[in-house]
Image (tube, grey):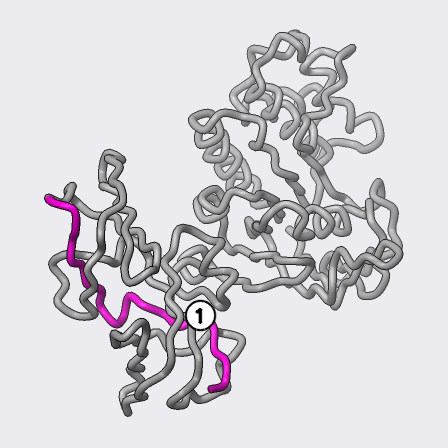
Amino acid sequence: MTRLELDAVSVEYGDTTALEDVSLSIRDGEFFTLVGPSGCGKTTTLRTIAGFEQPTTGAVRFGERDVTAVPPEDRGVGVVFQNYALFPHMTVGENVAYGLKFADPPGDVTASERVRTLLELVDMEEFADRDPASLSGGQQQRIALARALAPGPDVLLLDEPMSALDARLREHLRRQVRRVQRELSITTVYVTHDQEEALAVSDRVAVVNDGRIEQVGTPETVYREPASRFVAGFVGENNLLDGTVANVATNGTVTVAASDAEFAVAGGVPEGDAARTLAVGDHVTVSVRPAALDPAVETNRIELAIDQTAFLGERVRVDGDWRGHHVVAHLADRPDGDAVAVGFRPADARIVAVEDG
């Protein structure tokens, strides 16, 4: 297994900065995901780890080894691309075996034994003699994964490997990728723009925005304790309410005045502002997840004028208006009438941005 580090890495193309001072430490055997909107720099980060992009400043290390100037073929990385990139003139087995032309298989096994083992690992052992063109998109992606793993790389890199697949197949395949990664205990960096996918498969997540890292943490931390307004708005659905600090209690509970109402918030301050102390008059943004809005909760009550409802199986999505703010609630049942009163607990709200008053 291999620890992977990016130390103050920046990548520039002329006057354009694709990555700015990115530092990451990815643990041995970790499944680490880079998530963010299109053009944010996550694929550039992956390509810099692979050696396809050269940092303008900073360093890339695999363990104690500085690989910043090492070419891709000598880094010990396996890469799975979005478009599979299988060789059409080779069979499935020949595609998997391709990397073994340049490196011996790990362990005391032959190339054919290594191919057979990997095809079994991705549940494709019966397809060794098939042409790639005869396979479905999900099957081709599994072959691409097996091919990347064949030489026994130290690091596995996956660049949006599920984006071309339908939702049901994507969910099945990501579980399979996670299972393979755990069985091999290989350090893995995964790129996706799909927040649900990032939360579902990862040990830790880095949220990327405009070439910078906004937050690194476990899926639970990133979802429940967003470190910035951007993270709160990007990772999962959220309600963001702007207000002003009206009181800070000795127990840390903050009273926020917003649209002629007051809310009690126990969420503290964002990670990046951890050293500061909130003061009366500070302008803040409060995040409240739709699932936290509940008609049975008596604190922090608001009344939504219902715009529309949608039955989603285990929940009902309610889009409503509260004093000019669009608010989304996920409720157990479809509400009666054209309005619904909901509340949220102070512990279920979090301050995600602060500006001095």
Highlighted range, magenta: 337-357
The amino acid type found where label 1 is placed reads Val
Secondary structure category for the residue under label 1? strand
> Which residue is labeled 1 in the image?
352
Looking at the image, residue 143 lies above or below residue 202 = above
Residue 219 vertical placement versus 268 (above, below):
above
Q: Residue at x 58, y 43 (%)?
A: 192
Please tell me in which quadrant of the rendered image residue 268 appears.
bottom left
Q: Nearer the viewer, residue 224 or 135?
A: 224
Image height of 40 relative to 92, above or below:
below
Residue at (18, 66) in percent of width and height: 301
Q: Is residue 212 left or right of residue 87?
A: left
Using the image as rendered, state which of residue 202 and residue 327 is in the foreground.
Answer: 327
Circle 1 packing at 10 Å, graded few (<14), some (14-19), many (20+), is many
Observer able to see residue 149 = yes
**x then y, percent, for residue 346:** 25, 72
Percent x, y of residue 31 = 55, 49
| Depth order, front residue of 51/183 | 51
Asked whether, in this view, residue 245 is left or right of residue 272, the answer is left
Q: Is residue 116 left or right of residue 78?
A: left
In the rendered image, is residue 117 in sight?
A: no
Count of numbered labels shown in the rendering: 1
Q: Position of residue 101 (x, y in %)?
A: 83, 25
**Percent position of residue 252, x then y:** 31, 85
User: Residue placed at 89% from the left, 56% from the top?
Assistant: 14
Q: Residue at x 65, y 39 (%)?
A: 159
| Left or right of residue 118, residue 244 in this image | left
Question: 326 or 47, which is in the foreground?
Answer: 326
Residue 105 included in the magenta stretch of the image: no
